[in-house]
Image (tube, rainbow, N blue to C red):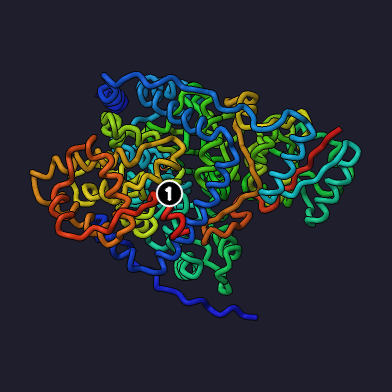
Amino acid sequence: MPVPPPPTRPVPPPPTPRAFPEAARDAVRDTTLRANLRHATHTIRDKRARAVAELEDWQRLREAGKRIKDHTLRHLDRYLEQLEAAATAAGATVHWAADADEANRIVTGLVKATGEREVVKVKSMATQEIGLNEALAAEGIHAYETDLAELIVQLGDDRPSHILVPAIHRNRAEIRAIFRERMGRWGRPAPDDLTDEPADLAEAARLHLREKFLRAKVAISGANFMVAETGTLVVLESEGNGRMCLTLPETLISVVGIEKTVPTWRDLEVFLQTLPRSSTAERMNPYTSMWTGTSDDDGPRTFHLVLLDNGRTDALADDIGRQALRCIRCSACLNVCPVYERAGGHAYGSVYPGPIGAILTPQLRGTTSEIDASLPYASSLCGACYDVCPVAIDIPEVLVHLRERVADQGGRGHRAEKAVMRAASWVMDHPAALAAGERAAARTRALHPGRPPGAGAWTESRDLPPLPAQPFRDWWKKNRT
Amino acid sequence: MSSRDRVLARVRAAVAGAPEAPAVLRDYLTSHTRDDPAALLDLLHDNLADYRALVHRADPAGVAPLVARLLAARGAKSVLVPAGLPDAWLADTDCVRVADRVEATAAELDAVDSVITGCALAIAETGTLVLDAGPAQGRRRITLVPDHHICVVRAPEQIVASVPRAMSRLDPRRPLTWLSGPSATSDIELDRVEGVHGPRALEVILLSG
Ligand code: SF4
């Protein structure tokens, strides 16, 4: 029986970054987006809770992960030097990039030196952060994203909206439309009879990408971990596109934030237990690749490691904010965040969405722009993100700290203040989120005397909903799951 | 000043005066499972199956007929064979044997129907196979490009309980590939679909005796 074509929306133009409140307001009005997000975050969060409950020593693993990262960050200079020496001894070439421009120059130069015009990429937030694809395009080099979700995003001229499932905001009908409309422009077109069954869509992606993998000479990746002791890099993934990129090409270029370092091989035993369970709610992700420099006759003959700062040392210098650098990008905090669930990842205006994005982005980029100044307010301070974080980042604490920073700079102009007011009024439209936020804010106010500008006037001018008798998360669980 | 020096100087300035971080605690468990070979074998079996690997059991006499049957069931005409794979495992199949060669192009690998390998070890608690390019495992790409992978695990000696137990047995200098079930994606409305890029079928033979 022929499958009737599903209803589709036209592929929309790419969103432009705006301050969180405006972007969030549109997202909240988009019912398709909200339904997709809600389904996804709830499914993952429930599965995750079960996967975590399997390990009776979860809290000890969490504490170990936190301490390993804190220790590494405290001595990051030493571990980076050790990493460089070990990776070099194993056959890697190590480069250092102080900022995005420098990283892009290095990578573009390395690709040009190979004479290739095409590279395959495995999903990497670091390269998204620095805008590498655009920099390569400016030099006439086409970078193919090979993660299925990234392919959906790239073909749709879109932006990722979730760390783990970047196309979480797209449903199957939209994906079919994107494949039908766009695949043929870049390679093998989608078949004419493509349905919106996930298996068929995945098959179309498999065929489209396979021809690229099999001819690729250069690949670009990020990494989940780098081991200082051995110079080993680690990539966790599910689809095998990572393995394709890390195995088949002749040249591999990995761009990795300096905070991804762990001191010892043994340290991986902690994160290989906590990351998959926190992230995809699996005991282990389908594929993990670990490589140490180059090896004879197996994998790329040439391996370049680009160590990226790009604002990380600014975060490192902040006593309270530096804990954000512990993040292992599991995305658990996104899936429990009531604000993320409504607003979607695009509203955060950065590759790092959700609660972690709200604290990481303003530290990496500073708080001078309107969007970056508004991000510390893109939260209800309910604390659910802290509870699920496998490296125990106290996200609410950092949010409050960054609000103070934004408040302190308020005197220099009205931009930040305006952004804050809009964020505040957005939260105001969502009484449950507000109630929880008020409660947490009230608790921490004594510790953090600096309040956001205008917050006093704003709260006085409105009737606040009564505080719930039960803790917010209980309410949330009961009413929203 | 080079960028290396600049980044390192920024790191040093950023942490100057920061208090020493508390010592790393390793009071987490090294295993969550009873050290009983039969229980570990069952747990590995269950967890592999849970990840939609197809799991079979065999004794030394049963491997060759089982391998032959699995290859025939997939309609495989050719099978990739890494160096060091016991000849006996392939004694009953008439598939064309394609040796793992350094010079083989990706397109050549793509034309092979199946691949059979051993492993370095398997982790029972997570249902994970670890390959380290050692004997009977071959280069990383041979278990990546063909669509059907048969992996033989020797019980009990290649089975460990947990991730910590695995780490202490592995050599980081070797290229390592950890497999937990076949390639999978959940990117489309979180529906799990097997086989986006890696082999769509992963069959595991648990070989004991
Ligand atoms: S902040 Fe914590 S929970 Fe959020 S992505 Fe990072 S590690 Fe995961």
Disc 1 CB within 8 Å of nearest ligand 1 atom: yes
Instruction: Name the quadrant of the N terminus of chain A.
Output: bottom right
Rendered location of residue B130, percent (x, y): 66, 35
Furthest-right residue in this view? B61
Place residue A356 in its image quadrant. top left
| Residue topped by disc 1 | A163
Place residue A395 in its image quadrant. top left
Give me the residue at 32% from left, 32% from top: A322
In front here: A468 or A82? A468
- Disc 1 residue type (three-letter): Ile
Element under disc 1: loop
Give me the residue at 57% from left, 60% from top: B191
Give me the residue at 13% from left, 53% from top: A457
Viewed as shown, does residue B107 lie left or right of A62? right
Give me the residue at 23% from left, 51% from top: A371
In front here: A469 or B147? A469
Viewed as shown, does residue A269 lie left or right of A325? right
Rendered location of residue A96, percent (x, y): 34, 30
Viewed as shown, does residue A248 lie left or right of A68? right
**Disc 1 chain ID:** A
Query: Can residue A249 be seen by looking at this rendering?
Result: no
In front here: A54 or B143? A54
Q: How many marks?
A: 1
Furthest-front residue in this view? A469
- Local crowd size for mark 1, using a 10 Å CA cut-off: few (<14), some (14–19), many (≥20): many
Rendered location of residue B168, percent (x, y): 62, 24
Query: Can residue A86 be seen by looking at this rendering?
Result: yes
Rendered location of residue A325, percent (x, y): 36, 34
User: On the rendering, which quadrant does ligand 1 occupy?
Assistant: top left
Place residue B208 in its image quadrant. top right
